[in-house]
Image (cartoon, grey):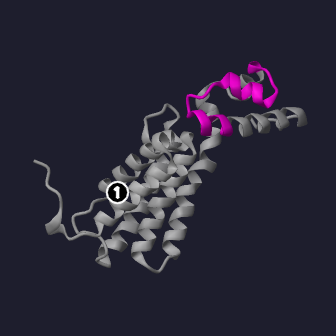
Amino acid sequence: MPTRPLRRDAARNREKLLREAAEVFTEQGLDGSLEEVARRAGVSIGTLYNHFPHRDALIEALLPERLAVLGELAVAADAEPDPWRALTGFCAGLVAHMIADRGLLEALVREHPAAAGIAEACRDGAARLTAVLARARAAGVVRPDLGDTDVAHLIWAMSLLGAEAGAEAGQRCLALALDGLRGRADLRFRPE
C-alpha cells in the first residue's frame, strides 16, 4: 500500500527535526538528547516520535548523507595523480570529518543498533580505502607491510584523539603517523 505524502506542516516539521537532529548528533553524538532535538525544532517530543518512532529511525534518516563523505573522499583520491597524496588526503579528510562530526565518528567506530546502513557504508569505505592503499603500495610510497586494518585503526585513533584533544592535535598526530608509514620496513618499531 503506497504511503500518503506528508501534509505541508508535517513535512516542514520533519525537515526541522532532521536539521536539528543533525546539529545535536554532531555536537553530542548519536546518544544526543531527543528532547533537545524536539525543543530546537520547536515541536513536541510526541511530534518527533510520530515522524521517527525510535532513535534508530532518526539515525537511519540522517546517516546516508553524512556517510556520503566516504565516497566524496574516494573520488578526490581517485582524481589525485600522486598515490601518496591520494592516501594522505583520504586519511586526513576522513579524520577531519570524524573530528568535526561526533555522530559520524560514533557511526563509524562503534556498534549501533541502526547498523544496516552504517555497515554498508563501512564496507564501501573499507573497499575505497583498500583501493587507495593498494595504489600507494603499488607505487612503493608506503611500507610494504602496511595493511588496510593498520590504516583504519590509525584513522580511528586520530579521530578519537582529535575529538578529545582538538582537531589540531588529531591532524598533527595523523601527519606524524603518516610520515612513519613511508619509512623502510627494516627500520620499524618492534614492541617487546
Report which residue position mark 1 lands on: 151
Q: Which amino acid type corresponds to the residue marked 1 in the rendered image?
A: Val
Name the one closer to the observer, 142 or 116.
142
| Location of the N terminus (image quadrant) | top right
Q: Is residue 143 above or below residue 149?
A: below
Q: Nearer the viewer, residue 10 or 90?
A: 90
Residue at horizontal 58%, vertical 54%?
68
Question: Percent position (x, y) of residue 10?
Answer: 84, 32
Q: Is residue 118 magenta?
A: no
| Position of residue 183 measured from the top left corner of the image (x, y, whole percent) | 24, 69
Q: Quadrant of residue 11?
A: top right
Residue at image x 43%, y 57%? 172
**Residue 33 belongs to magenta span:** yes
Image quadrant assignment for residue 23: top right
In the figure, 46 relative to 74: above or below? above
Residue 59: percent from the left, percent from the top?
60, 36
Give residue 104's position: percent from left, percent from top. 54, 44
Residue stretch rendered in magenta on the structure? 22-46
SS state under label 1: helix
Q: Is residue 62 left or right of residue 85?
A: right
Image height check: is 159 above or below 140?
A: above
Up-down: is 97 above or below 141?
above
Residue located at (41% from left, 68% from top): 132
Q: Residues within 10 Å of mark 1 (few under 14, many from 20)?
A: some
Q: What is the chief secondary structure element of the magenta stretch?
A: helix
Q: Residue at x 75, y 33 (%)?
A: 17
